[in-house]
Image (tube, rainbow, N blue to C red):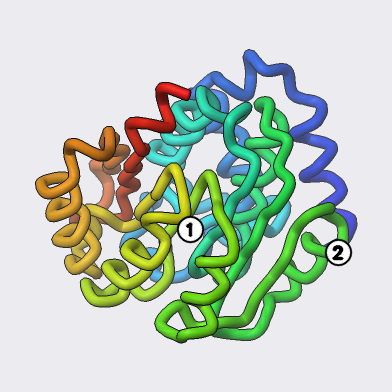
Amino acid sequence: MDKNISLIKKLFTSLKIESLKDQDFLEHFIIPHLGLNNEILNEQPPELNAFYGTGLGLKIWQYPNQFSKYLVFLSNYSKKINSYIEIGCRNGGTFALHNEYLKSTGSKLQQSVAIDIVEESDFMSSYRNQSSNVTFLKINSFSEEFKSYIKDNFFDLVFIDGDHSYEGVKNDAEITRNYCNIQVFHDTVNNACPGVGIYWNELKNNHFNTYDFFDFTDQYDSVNGTYLGIGVAIRKEWLTI
């Protein structure tokens, strides 16, 4: 595990910025070879079978055709992103990818926090031990402890991927809204958890004066259904700073 994390870090530090901002390169090479999640494979494209549970062990639960476009988009703001929190980090693959990509595209991440309601995974523990300014918190985002933690901190970027019910995503969004500049929502078009999409559309309809909204929802023709999806809400006033 430790060796894989060293390889991940070396990979990102070795890549030129042109490669890091090449959407096709990220989609077809970087993200799959880091390793994709190997659960609920009926929701995953069969053409990527060689990468589920393999690679460098990140078990990234993302569609490469969505996440690659999202990362390239995010790179436009990397130099302004100094702090990051992920709500619902699971294995830690998406968290690690965010961290390494942001740093490689100009971020000077000073604080990076992964939270989940379950014990820290082996991957997350190893990644944290080999990374500066990285913290894992076992905490429930519905708790008063979490509310207090958010009020005492401020994050440029929040990735919301925890409780996928309508009530869960609403809770996470509303607690962090006044303490961040960018909110990212995962599973905005996912047939398996429609509550996220309902809340995401409500947010776009009700807060268009406060945020600029962006969607990354490409699908694979080989998959029966619509899954995952990434929605980004960026505070308008932050864009002008």
Q: Amino acid at mark 2?
A: Asn
Query: Which residue occupies the foreground of this view, 110 or 198?
Result: 110
Residue 94 appears in the picture as rendered: no
Residue 57 at x, y percent in the picture: 69, 59
Residue 19 at x, y percent in the picture: 64, 19
Residue at x 51% of width, y 47% of height = 157
Residue 24 at x, y percent in the picture: 49, 23
The local crowd at label 2, few if under 14, some if 14 to 19, many if 20 or more residues have their Cα within 10 Å, is few
Relative vertical location of residue 238 with respect to residue 6 in this rendering, above or below? above
Query: Which residue occupies the foreground of this view, 176 or 162?
Result: 176
Residue 124 at x, y percent in the picture: 71, 67
Residue 129 is tagged as 2
Residue at the farthest top position: 18
User: Residue 129 sits in which quadrant?
Assistant: bottom right
Residue 173 shown left or right of residue 85 in the figure: left
Residue at label 1?
61
Residue at x 21% of width, y 72% of height = 166
Residue at x 42% of width, y 61% of height = 176
1 or 2: tag closer to the N-terminus? 1
Residue 49 appears in the picture as rendered: yes
Residue 120 shown left or right of residue 37 in the figure: right
Q: Amino acid at mark 1?
A: Trp
Q: Are marks 1 and 2 in contact (CB under 8 Å)?
A: no
Cα separation between marks 1 and 2: 22 Å
Residue 172 is tagged as none
| Secondary structure of residue under mark 2 | helix
| Secondary structure of residue under mark 1 | loop
Q: Quadrant of the N terminus?
A: bottom right
Residue at x 56% of width, y 25% of height = 25
